[in-house]
Amino acid sequence: MKQRVYTILVEHFKKWGITHVFGIPGKSISPLMLELENYDIQYVLGRHEAGCGFEASGYALAAKTMGIAIGTSGPGGTNLITAAAQAKEFQLPVLFITGQPSMQETGRALSQDSSQFGADLVKMFEPVTLFSARIERGDTLYLYLKHALEKAYTGEKGPVHLCIPFDVLMEEVETFYLPLPDHISPVVSPDIDKAITLLDEAKKPVLFVGKGAVMSDTYDQLQTIAEHWGIPVMTTPGGKGAFPTHHPLYLGGYGLGGSKYATDYLKSGVDLMIVVGSKLCDMSLSGFTADMEPDKVLQFEYDITFAGKTIQAPTQLILGDIRSNLTQLILRSGATSKEHEMLTPRAQAAAAASSQLESTTLSAGAAFRSLRAVLPKEAVLFGDAGSHSFHAVQHFEIIEPGTFFFDEVFIAMGAAIGYSIGAKIAMQDCPVVCVTGDGCIMMHGTEISTAVNHGIPVIFFVLNNGRLDMVEKGMSYNTGRSVGAVYERPLDISLFAQSMGATAFRCENETDIKQAVQTALQSNTVAVIEVMVDPQEIPPILTRLLSLD
C-alpha cells in the first residue's frame, strides 16, 4: 500500500505515542500540519521557532520519548538551530523537521531556499545535531528516517534533523513503520573492575557529579556508591539535581554557585576524583586551582572527546552508558547503601543564613528559600541562563533528585521558558517552575502566550533587577566597569505577563513570594511571579574571570 510521505511521518508520531508537536506553520510544511489534526495530535503553535524547539526538547525530557519540532524553510529553519544545539547539550532525542520550497525547482531562484543554493539548512544543522540530511526523493524516506532515529537513540542521545522539500512530502511511497530504537543495548565498559580497584584503594575520594548524571537518571546508583564507599559528593551547576541537598555526604556545589565546603574539601587533598557525567568545562571548574588537583581521576562518560583534557591527573575512563556502567559497578562490587554522619555543619550554616540582617531589598537567596518553603518536594524546576539560576544552584534545596534541570555549557538564554512548557505537557500532575530573569524574558518571554493559549499551567518565577546581571557584575568585577548590560527602562514583567493573559504577581518581599506561589499552585493556571531583587547583590559567579591582557 502506498501513502504520502507526510502521512507516513504523522502515523509514526502517533504510533510512537507522541501527543504534541511544536512549530510555526509555513507553506513548505503545511501538509504535515494539516495531517497532525487528522491524527488527533495537538499542534502547539509557538511564538518563535527557537521557543518551539525548546518546547519539543522539554517534552522529550519529561515524556522520555522523541520530541518533534517543525519549522518552515529559510528563516523558520535557521531559528531552530539554537534549540537544536541546546537539545544536543541536554542529550535529548528531538527530531527537527524543516521544509524546502521544491526539490524539482532546486537550482533556480527560490524564496526561502534551504538547499545548497540558498541557506543550506542541512549544513547549518550538522554541528548541532547527531544527523542532518535532506530527503530528495520519497523512496529514500525509510533509510533516512532509520538513520536519524538510530543516531538519536544510540549511546549519548541527541537531536537529529531532516529537511524535506514540499514536493517530496507530497510523494506517494510504499508504507512502512520504524519503532523508536530504544531497545538497543547500552554500551558497558570492560574496565569496571579497574574502577572498583581504584575505589577500594582510595583514601580521600570525592564524587564530582555533572549534568550527564541527571540526564542518565543515575540518582539511586550515585547514592549507593557514595554510601558504600563513604564518598563525599559535590555537584556541578548542571549536576545540581542529581543528589539531595540534605544527604549527610553532600558537600554542596562546585563551580559557579558553589559552596565553600566543596572548595575547602578539594584543597584538603583528594587522591581520587570520581567524575560522573561532566565535561569539566570552565563553568563547572570555575575557581579550580593547582592545589585542588587530585592524584587520580576516574571518569564515567559517554564520549572520550573531553576526557583527560582539563584536569591533567592520570585518568581512568569508563566509557559507555553512564547508568549501565554504574549499575554494573554496584553489582560486581556488591555495594550497598549505608548510613553516614553529616560531613559538614549544615545545621550551623542554616542557622547563620536565617540570622542574617534584614535588608530593605530582597536578596535572591531569600527569594529561593521562600520558593522552596511553599513548593511541594516533587515540583520540577528548569533554570534559565543567568545569575538567577546560579543563585538557585546555591540556595534552592533539592529534596528529591531529578527535580532540577540546568545547563552550564551551551546556556541559551530563554531556553528554560520553552523547556518548562514542553515538560508541563508531559507532567500534568506535577508542578513545573521556570526560573528565569528579565533578560531571558525579553529573549523568549512571548512563549508565555503559548502556554496561556494552550492551557499549560507553568509557574514562571522571574527575578527582575533591570539588567543582564551575570554580564554586568562579571564585567564590573573584572574590568572595573560594564558596558551595555543595564536597561535604561527595565521591563515591567507583571504587566507584560498580563498582556498575554497570564496571572501575574509582583513580589517585593518573602511574604509576597510565598503567597504568590501558593495562589499559583491552587489556581492551576499560567502564572508569572515577578520578584524584585536587589540590583546591587553580587551573584555567585565571580570566580569566572575575564582577562583583557
Image (spheres, grey):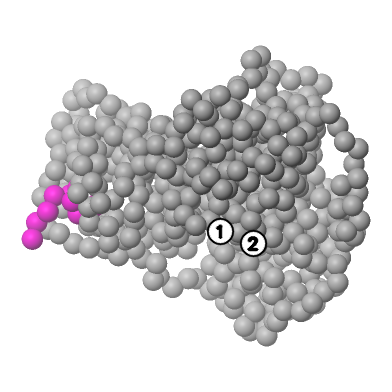
Q: Is residue 425 left or right of residue 283?
A: left
Q: Is residue 281 above or below residue 378?
A: above
Q: Position of residue 12 (x, y in %)?
A: 26, 57
Q: Is residue 541 magenta?
A: no
Residue span colored magenta: 1-10
Reading the image, the residue beneath label 2 is 401
Residue denoted by label 1 = 215
Nearest to viewer (mark 2 / mark 1):
2
Quarter placement of the N terminus:
bottom left
- Label 1 is placed on what type of residue? Met
Quadrant where the C terminus sits is top right
* Residue at horizontal 68 percent and vertical 23 percent from the top: 466
Q: Secondary structure at mark 2?
A: loop
- Mark 2 vs 1, N-terminal side: 1
Give the residue type at disc 2. Answer: Pro
Please tell me whether residue 188 is drawn above or below residue 280 in the rendered image.
below
